[in-house]
Amino acid sequence: MDQPKFITKQRKRLQDHQKNNFPHEVIHDDFLQVMAIIFRFSRWFGVAGSGNIMWKTYGLCILLMLGFIEGVAIWRVVRALAGLASDIEGHRSVTARLAGATFYASSITTLILSWKLSSSWETIASYWTSINRRVAINVPTDKKIKNRMITVTSVMVTCVVVEHAMSMMSQVGFDCPPSLILKRYTLMSHGFLLLRTDYSIWFAIPLLFMSKIATILWNYQDILIVLISMGLTSRYNTLNQYVAKFSTHIQDFPWNPHGECSKGYMWRRIREAYVKQAQLVRRLDESLGGLILLSNLVNFYFICLQLFLGITQGLSGDLIKRLYYVVSLVWVCVRVSCVVLAAADINVHSTKALRHLHASDRHYYNVEIVRLQSQLSKDYVALTGLGFFSLNRTILLQVHGRSNNHV
């Protein structure tokens, strides 16, 4: 039997063996499982995604109500700028009206973009799983990613609840009678929408509900970016660990008895795994880019607004208001840092394998290692804000510098 027929026969035997012994191979990915739970839970605040008709109807109602509030907020801004507003003091100033309109506009945009992402998540998850199947090396799974995701989500949600509770207390104060809590909170938090003479409990309750939905959506986009970034970073980290182990113990790896036995072939499969990983990052970037751009713009705006108000008005009011101002500003800055650093880790880990390649034994150095080095050095991998900017660790310094210039 000549050599080509022998190799073909051996490959067919191996394929039949895999097909018979693994006919329904299912790859369990903890990251995808946690994200599926996140998207199912997000239906409660309007991100219907791939939910049934009831969830989509509920989400559409949320969107319409947010749109109505935004329309009124924009009209109030126009009246204030045109000099037609009857009251532009305090919580009804042009700055307050513009901040309120920006807040609800960002919530509407977040809802639309998150809805789009959750609708396509099944396709993304299938692509994610197919990448796992097509990687021709035995890369170990990250068994701690699920716990890390749960921990990060719990911490961020706890911080959001604490910050928002302090916001409500600062708006109401401790001297307010229980019967007037709803009225005072509504007029203080939504003074850019309602005058005292416009107040009605029939307006207050729906407005209170929608304000909580908008607050959840504002924070939800950041949590979503952080979690997806953690998943992509985890994949790069496991690949880098595999390269480190292979480059250190390459002489211990056995030869393949079916002909594909060279170490160069193994390095080529590793290089292809990095190519597929970069494709996965770019696939996620296409779906997540809008949320990244929105998150950075809105958070940047509110950081500048908080600094502006702190400088122009000072820390006035009672203790709870002063404390809330500090906590709110610190939390927005921390949240922006978490988003940027989590996404920037993808860029950092995409080139970490280079140090292992440079340190590999010269006796096993080959052309595939050279190609992998060139690929990792020249292929820039990072999440972007629709291509306007890339999220890396230098962007925090850029945002800090721009904030100081604007203030």
Image (tube, grey):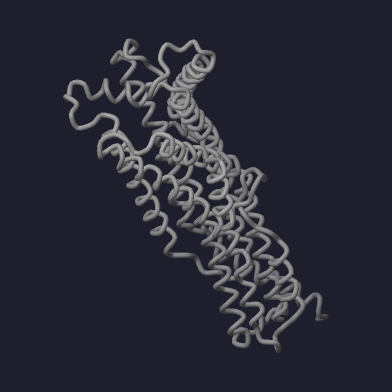
Is 192 above or below relative to 279?
above
Question: Taking 146 as reference, is 205 left or right?
Answer: left
Q: Position of residue 88 (x, y in %)?
A: 42, 18
303 or 237, nearer to the observer = 303
Q: Position of residue 130 (x, y in %)?
A: 60, 55
Q: Position of residue 27 (x, y in %)?
A: 51, 59
Q: Residue at 42% across / 31% down in the picture? A: 214
Rendered image quadrant of residue 291: top right
299 or 130, nearer to the observer = 299
Rendered image quadrant of residue 240: bottom right
Is 117 above or below relative to 245?
above
Is 6 above or below relative to 398?
below
194 or 226, nearer to the observer = 194
Q: Is residue 78 visible?
A: yes
Give the quadrant of the N terminus: bottom right
Q: Position of residue 398 (x, y in %)?
A: 59, 51
